[in-house]
Amino acid sequence: MDIAIIGGGIGGLTAALTLHQLGISCTVYEAARELRPSGTGINLQPYCVRELYRLGLEDRIREIGISARGLAYYTRLGQHVLTERLGSEAGFDWPQFHMHRGAFHMMLADQVNRRLGPGALKLGHRCVGVEQDGNGVTVRLVDRETGKTAGPVSADVLIAADGVHSTVRAHFYPDEKPPHWNRVIMWRGVTGDTRMLDGRTMIVMGTFRQKFVAYQIRKPPAERAAGENDIMLNWLCELIVPEDVEFRPEDWNRAGSAEDFAQEFRDWVFPWIDVPDIVSRTAGIWEYPQVDRDPLPQWTFGTVALLGDAAHPLTPIGSNGASLAIVDARILGRELAANPSDPQAALKAYEADRRPAMEKVLGGNRAGGPEHFMPLVEARAPDGFDDIRDVLSEEELRIASNYRALTGLTTELVNGCRSLIPPEHFVN
């Protein structure tokens, strides 16, 4: 079996490493001409870390990540609401990691080149079309810079891991509406020489109307200097923008300016954190509209499967995006290894496993994710409180843990499975 993967992001590269582990031939086609350690921070949840360890990446994950201890919620007045334990501190057999997205991405790309060989990851190849027949699938590719033909490429199976603006998804859903925007803009940055709380606790402050999120990450290895402190603070500021502000698809992931949001956070100065200072000292700011897409009725089409954001782009609430794409890759690999003579059946089994689960997560994210209780605090105690239990019931205080159960993040589910792929399928 030979598989073509469109998209060399986290989902596509994890799929390649998984297929290699299972002895299945594959090639990744990425539109970017060069991969760089760009981006800000991400979280890797324990159920995802378990799978990365099974890929033999534990030492590298520990080198570039910070093991998370807790997630603390604060009001816009700086009052502590509650703290959840995370990862190993919460009883999981695997940690949760905060890390630099670019460092993680580059590590995966390096491992693909090392394990599969340098020809397995082809850069500068943009997918412009897909065709299927009884023999498999043909992908039409062009050189991203010149527009000249760089294909076609034939394969038994095509995995589309090409993101929220997936070309392959658009091929099967040409009339799909643009991404759904909830009128929230996120501005993200990374600030050096800043330590927050114990250095291993993530914070969420405020509500969906105005929010600040932060956690510590390490500099990518290529950017570390000898003897220099490599710890940085990854942060984001969120605001709901006025109705007359239009969303443009080309605004995705563009350079932003503190002038557009910093004034709204000017009073967010507390003994344990100074938001205006953190924003003012950042090296660069990036602006993202908070978007998702409505769930699809179908992810697989003959010998073509959607994966990650191409299948289920989610609003970035709950720190699950990258982790869920990695789980997609592992389950798709498992089904292909279990059904080598019938790839179409394998893809259908993958979809049957993942699509219903992701519809539940999408619904949970649109409802506010694990932070759904924070607006209740703001509404009931706008001037602050003495005891949070005078504001929220015990059931309301469990909203965050209930959301995590929705995503499969319980100790029983995670610790009860040592790997999504039976070890007898492993070849490499």
Image (tube, grey):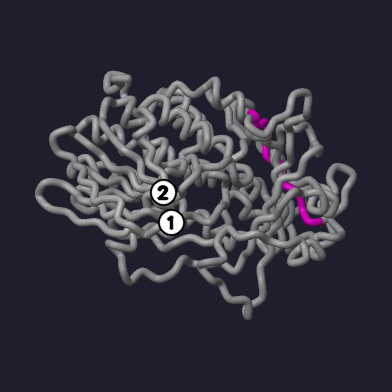
Mark 1 and 2 residues: CB-CB less than 8 Å, in contact? yes
Q: Which residue is mark 1?
A: 145
Front residue (pair 146, 397)? 146
Q: Which residue is mark 2?
A: 124
Q: Main secondary structure of the magenta part?
A: strand
- Looking at the image, residue 44 sits to the left or right of residue 188; the answer is left
The residue shown at (61%, 29%) is: 64
Label 1 element class: loop
Judged from this view, the residue extending furthest toward the right is: 271
Residue 382 at what x, y percent from top left?
80, 62
**Region of the chain picked out in magenta, as a range:** 65-76
The residue shown at (33%, 36%) is: 331
In this orientation, does residue 168 appear? no
- Looking at the image, residue 164 sits to the left or right of residue 223; the answer is left
- Looking at the image, residue 295 sits to the left or right of residue 351; the answer is right
Judged from this view, the residue extending furthest toward the bottom is: 244
Residue 68 painted magenta: yes
